[in-house]
Image (cartoon, coloured by chain):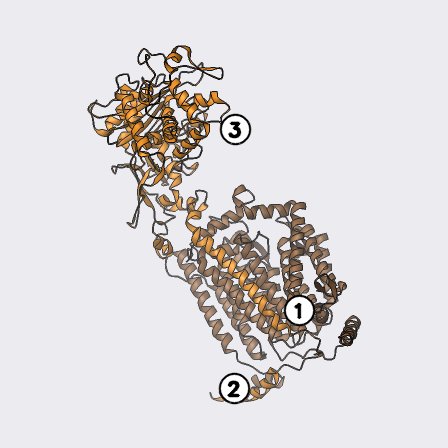
Amino acid sequence: MTRALYRAGIRPRFRWRELRLLVVVALCLTVGWISLESFRQGQVAIGDALLLTVYLLALGVIHVAFVVTGRHMDQILFPTAALLAGISLLVMNRLPQDLVVQQVGGTELPLGPLQLVWILLGFSLLAAIAIFVRSDGWLRRYKYTWAAAGIALLLLVFVLGSVTGGARLTLHIGPFSGQPSELLKVILVVFLAGYLAENRALLSSGITRVGAFTLPPLPYLLPMLAMWGIALAIVIVQRDLGAALLYFLVFLGLLYVATRRALYVLFGIVLFLVGGALLYVLFAHVQDRINIWIDPFADRQGAGYQVIRALYAYGRGGILGTGLGAGLPAVGAVPSIPLIHTDFVFAAIAEEMGMIGALAVLGLYLVIAERGFRIAAAAADDFRALLATGLTLVIVVQAAIIAGGNLRVLPLTGVTLPFISYGGSSLLVNGAVIGLLLALSDRGVDPPPRGVRPNAVVRAAQRARAVGGRVEEALS
Amino acid sequence: MTGPRVRLQQLRLHLRPRMRTRGAPPPLPGGAPSDPPRVGRSLLPLTVALAVAYAALAGGLAYWQVAQAQALTADPLNPLSLAAARSAPRGTIYDANGIVLVSNVRGPNGERLRQYSYSIAAPVIGYSSAIFGTAALERTYDAQLTGLVSLNPGDEMLRKFRGQPYDPSDLHLSLDIQLQRVAADLLGDQKGAVVAIEPATGRILALVSSPTYNANRVVDPTDGRQYMAGLQARDDSPLLDRATQGLYVPGSVFKIVTSIAGLGSGAITPQTTYADQPAELETGFLVDGFRIHDFPRTVQTDHPLDYAEALEVSSNIWFAHAGLDTGAQSLTDWAARLGFGARIPFDLPTSPSQVTGGDGPLDGFADRVELANAAYGQGEVLVTPLQMALVASTIANNGTLMRPTLVDSLTSSSGSVTRLEPQTWSQVCSFETAQTIRSAMQQAVEGEFAVAAAAKIPGVPTAGKSGTAQVGPNAAPHSWFVGYAPADAPRIAVAVIVENGGLGSQRAVPIGGRLMSAYLGVPR
């Protein structure tokens, strides 16, 4: 069989480091599973480990697929995502199972199995993208198409989205429902990477002078303002503060990486503060969020309830945690923190695995950041570098936003904790993000297109600068 | 068997050279000299920013899970305490002599119930009910009693490795249930409160509020709701802890506070006399149109009284003069040192006592009339019995106010003991000031013309002050006594109030005397 693959141009490449890490992941998850079951049964037991077995087998299959198809990809990202999703499997299996129940092909699947299904789908997408995406042309070439698709998606949500938890987030189309804001973040990154890669030179060169500041030609500042407007619109219409914050921060991060101009970031932060102040004054739901953040105890049975319950969970967890199964994410069948399986899953982890466990989870996101930035730094051209940076930021910043909200470091905004929160949209999209990063990490990917002519504006600006330089020389 | 291995090696040989060609990135397009530097270099500041953000998250985790962990877990509204109440026995509560005050029993349906051995201790101990939650000490020490909080930080960390996750602690109180019994019997079915303190330590020896309730019936799963509804409907507020939350007009017992302020600020001395005072016995002391009178008496009318004589016969006129000389600001400030104006930090909820309503133009007082009246405990003065017991205790302890405490120690099920040591709360006045007041208070019980003579314990020097607090034209005055004994080496300080009990000297004073003598073991 190997010969057949070889003839087909596919050459296996062993990934020992990934395998070793996956073995560690499997050990951790098995120990976690045994710990949970042992607590439930009062004696050392592994119980019905079907879910865990299926998951570990799936990891093995994906690893073998990577080996057989032989791409020269990063070996750390996949085990990292696998550990995060494995922790999610443990937690979802531990929470009250009737938090979410869905009919899938005639059988009712409760929370734990359902999450496994989503994880498997997400990882299938991850593997498919990592294995089959050999060219970035389809992302690079059609950036305005992507932007249009994103805006269409946004409008669709504005018009058709249904309201859950005070925010218009969910889109139902036929039997399918999903949260488009998850997909939108990837589209946004693709567009920004394309736009910024093309206009980097201009954006990072000062041309307009305003007092002591040199700014690029004003039309190039428009994207910044447009982005700001989109973020505001999302907050106002969609009431999705988390997504707006995520988009804006990722945008600022990419803008900085593309231009290395701290002034932009400063300008962006000023815009952000102005926008935030405006929204606070104008919109009650924004005020509520901020007020709860400042003092949840002011309305402890009402608005502050969720946050206070999470704080109790942290207190109970302490440094080492209560142990899996021994915490109190639920009294009987009632979750002690509303939305503990989505927005507040970080609190559940911090309670049962303690500060140590929560720090480890944060550490895993930083591992993703390190790998992602490494891929960006080694990328063959600006588009790929910006794309890798943006995809990495999307995961790492989102994790920071929701963990910060859980911890009262930031006002609470409802975004998912990547790979851990329950939810199909989130797992699929984040799987795709890691898949893309893996594909980008393969330097054997088709080389970037050569000889792309700078567009007319760039050419004009370069010429103008050349003339300006000559004039300057002549004067001096 | 060797086939696959050979093939593998062949594959590797094929792979190696190809890997090198693949590894090198293709040359970059463009590369004009005006291009900005490679993107990769600006990743460092971004990484730093992310690291800072994640460090903030780690800081948040440490704050909630280490610094605030105990406080959060001990919060009575934490649902953990409900869960713990279902699965763990609560700790036992003992009195100062090791007598069991609260223990656990099984209810008719096998549920855990608290059994309260002494209903007279209800205001102190409260209840722990599946329906009504917790009250009083059962509430304050809920986390310790259920064992949610371990006494020892090391135990706390290793809790998850123990079989039983809860570590319930027993409470050992300073309360002496026999003294509590004496005090409750002395009050009988009169409404009122008694507080007894050990002056040198602040340990509460007895804290009685009458009427009170039967905590066993509150926690009764079948009868509890009905009983509670009945309690709430009653006019005499049996659920209110009068000793810590009842606010009463103090009358003449407040003269001790005026004494501390006057002597402490130097506005009066032990030798201070007011020349007009004997004449004003007849006419009244006219303050801005308001006449202040003494309670009619036939003794000590012939000469201007000094400080000790004024306290002995409880002259309102003398103390009205002294209060005006002391001044509004000074009176409020010195009272604040005793705890007035704020909630007393205590194991039970407390109401703040006040010298004045607080929004008048004269440093909070409406006018000089209010100030003059406040100086002898009328006006807008409102106090809790606990606050007055602390006043007596401060004088008995030579001017040092100890923090009042109810719990001597906690013993965890694993055997570790935490002692709560006495703490100085504030240094109220100088030793000399306290000595002056001490001798005057002794004279007020033992003097030739003493109003509070009924408090005298045979063979034991006794000090005290009676009070008759006017509460309106149609109601009998509140009857007050504060005092301590032995006067030369105080072991107990008390405050007694009988609501609408009439003259202090007739109701509250004998109760105080008998209570102190019972504690000191002197038969009467």
In three-dimensional space, the C-alpha distance between marks 3 and 2, rounded to whole angstroms, equals 93 Å
- Marked residue chain, label 3: B
Type of amino acid at the residue the image marks with label 1: Ala
Residue B432 placed where, x, y %? Answer: 31, 32
Binning the other alpha carbons within 10 Å of mark 1 as few (below 14), some (14 to 19) or many (20 upward) gives: many
Mark 3 or mark 2, which has the lower sequence index? 2
Asked where in the image residue A429 lies, by quadrant, the reply is: bottom right
Rendered location of residue B328, percent (x, y): 46, 27
A166 or A261: nearer the viewer? A261
Query: Height in image: A338 above or below B254?
Result: below
Q: Quick one: SS at disc 2?
A: helix
* Residue where numbered disc 1 is placed: A258
Front-most of residues B126 and B317: B317
Q: Secondary structure at mark 3?
A: loop
The residue at which mark 3 appears reads as B359
From this view, report whether residue A367 is shown above or below residue A113. Answer: below
Q: Is A27 or B484 nearer to us in this picture?
A: B484
Q: Pointer 2: what residue? A: B8
Q: In this rendering, do the residues under marks 3 and 1 share a single chain?
A: no
